[in-house]
Image (cartoon, coloured by chain):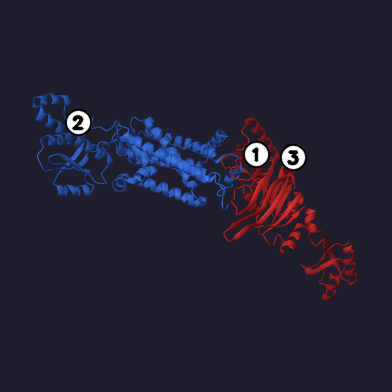
Chain colours: A red, B blue
Amino acid sequence: MSNAVVKIENLVKRYNELIALDHFSLEIEEGEIFGLLGPNGSGKTTTINCLLSLLSYDKGTVELFGTKMAPDNYEVKKNIGIVMQNVAVFEELTVYENIDYFCGLYVSDKEQRAKLVEEAIGFVGLEEFKKFYPKKLSGGLLRRLNIACGIAHKPKLIIFDEPTVAVDPQSRNKILEGIVKLNEQGATVIYTSHYMEEVEQICTRIAIMDKGKCRAIGTNSELKKLIRNTETISIEVVKPSDEDMKEIASLPHAYEAVYEDSKLVVRYSGGKHNLIRLMQLLSEKQYDMGRVYSEIPTLNDVFLEITGTALRDSE
Amino acid sequence: MFFHKYKYGLLQTIRNKELVFWALGFTIILGTLFYAAFGNVYEKDEVFEAIPVAVVENVQDDGFTQLLSELSQGEDKMLALNNTDKEKAEKLLENGDVEAIITVDESITLSINSTSDNISVSIVGSIVNEYNTKSALFEEIAKTNPEKLPQATEAMNVNIDNVLEEHKLTDAPMNPYTDYFYNLIAMGIMFGSTFGMTIAINSQGNLSAIAARKCVSPAKKSVSAIADILAAVTIVFACSAITILYVKYVLGVELGDRLGMYILTALCGSVMSVSLGYAVGSIGSMGEKAKGAILLTVTLLGGFLSGLMSHGMRQIVEANVPFINKVNPAAILTDAFFSLTVYPHYDRYIRSIIGMAVITVICTVAGIIMTRRKKYASL
């Protein structure tokens, strides 16, 4: 890749016996919304902290904008915005003052800063809450303030570390829309989450992390092509006999048939008209069918097949 | 960048109600309670309470006997004498019944112990020294130029009133209860160390999310730290100045005629106190609670040893482990106030100010070095 904004090579981070990052490598191009997907403890936040030179690491290199990242690399830091997992604002300052304070760490010109602060307030929709202290804000509004503090200076690279944890669906959608908008305005975005739906919704490329390793990397469709599953059909039906189950499993392109939660679940690898064939067979065998579901694979299926555990199970 | 940080440092600190309460509200409330508790005593005769002294006369010295007699008479007598023998006098001193023993031999000597009151000892010591100096001078003149003895007597104008005037240490009132008030002011200033620790915590990425956000920014930690420290110093100093003015003008406690110097001392103390908190907050990779516990131990123990909680403790430490008083920030600050109250000259006061400056520089530089350009092993 030519325009790498972030380049991580062979990063190793140990906490005594625990290996938090195990030879982790990654390149992120300019203009991407790059998702780091993995369960809690998979190493997403550790990666971000090493990337920002907050954490020391045992081995490997981290380059941002083509230069080695270090705590005193102030030129690179000017171009970074961070939205932390934990809300990082001052309780003693109002919404406006908090954004102005953090923006002031990057922009010294007062007039320019005032303009940027107003823009950030408008961007996250906190116009009515400018003079509010953080403790008077709801969880969702607080998250929005947290975002405004991280993006007000218009950074080229913005890192969102699980920004939607404990956020109501309405605020979550606003946040996700905002991230896409920032990307459209030219920012490269790194987005970490253990919510696969969010990552699937907004990220242009995704790295699946598990136990400190990058298990797979690619676009949403590229990742899904990595696995055998192309379609999962579930039908509410009484449990078929063992003999019938064997017959179902031997249908063209089916590679697995199980009965779980009062549903027959059949997984396919490729092929067309799988649903019709399955329903024909069940009708021939005179099974009464209830609701029928046909699902294309999700990132959870990708995660399941790559790591052996479901993303939600491993949290 | 610096003024931006300073401005917001001021806003954050002044709006931190808990910290401001301890630095200002608490000291004002406690000061008012002090005044209510011994206000009557303060206004009446306690101010001029005679100093209890044991006198052991091994030889006859008429001049000194007359001097003591003059000083121990009248309504505003300075000394309360107890003529006794050496053994009984030592027992009286040990029991705290007297502040000092005056032994009349060929020369007059003074014995004190570690619990003796500093002001009382200074007064009695000055009387004895003055008498010894002048009697030696007269003896010398009598031997070498006996004819000039009358002129010498006249020139020195040796009378009791004059002796009393010359021994006055300062224009400030010799009131033991004033101690409580400048100890209180010192205690309020030492609370400023908590402000310093908050600054340190908010600059270490492994201790708070705010600090992590600041660490990621291009703002230099040293610049941020100095701006934040100055903002905190401004607030701590303002709190201490308000406390001083409240004690002097609202409660009416006489702090002497060196109000400006008191305020200056409060400023130096504020800088030292915030720096101390900043240094303790910057030590190692411990959590906020552990650092808070260390700071609390340092300030409370320092405060106790300097007499902020127990009157006379500083004198006990001075008698037994004087080194502690030289490195204990609370003791140095208290000593600066004490020097201003008691001594007419500035020698001891300047030593205290230098001590505060040294602690400030060491703490600030150490704090910045410990926190700057740092990657953390864990967050």
Image position, residue B170 (x, y; %): 29, 32
State if disc 2 and disc 3 touch (CB < 8 Å).
no
Query: Circle 2 marks a residue in which chain?
Result: B
Residue A311 seen: yes
The residue labelled by disc 1 is A129
Image position, residue A143 (x, y; %): 65, 46
Residue toward you, A298 or B17: A298
State if disc 1 and disc 3 touch (CB < 8 Å).
no
State if disc 1 and disc 2 touch (CB < 8 Å).
no
Query: Circle 1 marks a residue in which chain?
Result: A
Marks 2 and 1 sit apart, C-alpha to C-alpha, by: 73 Å
**Image point (58%, 61%), residue name:** A17
The residue labelled by disc 3 is A185
- In the image, taking residue B284 as reference, residue A190 lies left or right, namely right
Q: Are marks 3 and 1 on the same chain?
A: yes
Q: Amino acid at mark 1?
A: Phe
Marks 3 and 1 sit apart, C-alpha to C-alpha, by: 25 Å
Q: Are marks 3 and 2 on the same chain?
A: no
Which of pointers 3 and 1 lies earlier in the amino acid sequence?
1
Image position, residue B279 (x, y; %): 47, 44
Dividing the image into 4 quarters, which one contains the N terminus of chain B?
top right
**Tag in front: 3 or 1:** 3
Q: How many C-alpha atoms fall within 10 Å of the one at disc 2: few (<14), some, or many (≥20)? A: some
Q: How many C-alpha atoms fall within 10 Å of the one at disc 3: few (<14), some, or many (≥20)? A: few
Query: Tag 1's secondary structure?
Result: helix
The residue labelled by disc 2 is B163
Residue B243 seen: no
Q: Amino acid at mark 2?
A: Val
Image position, residue A179 (x, y; %): 72, 45
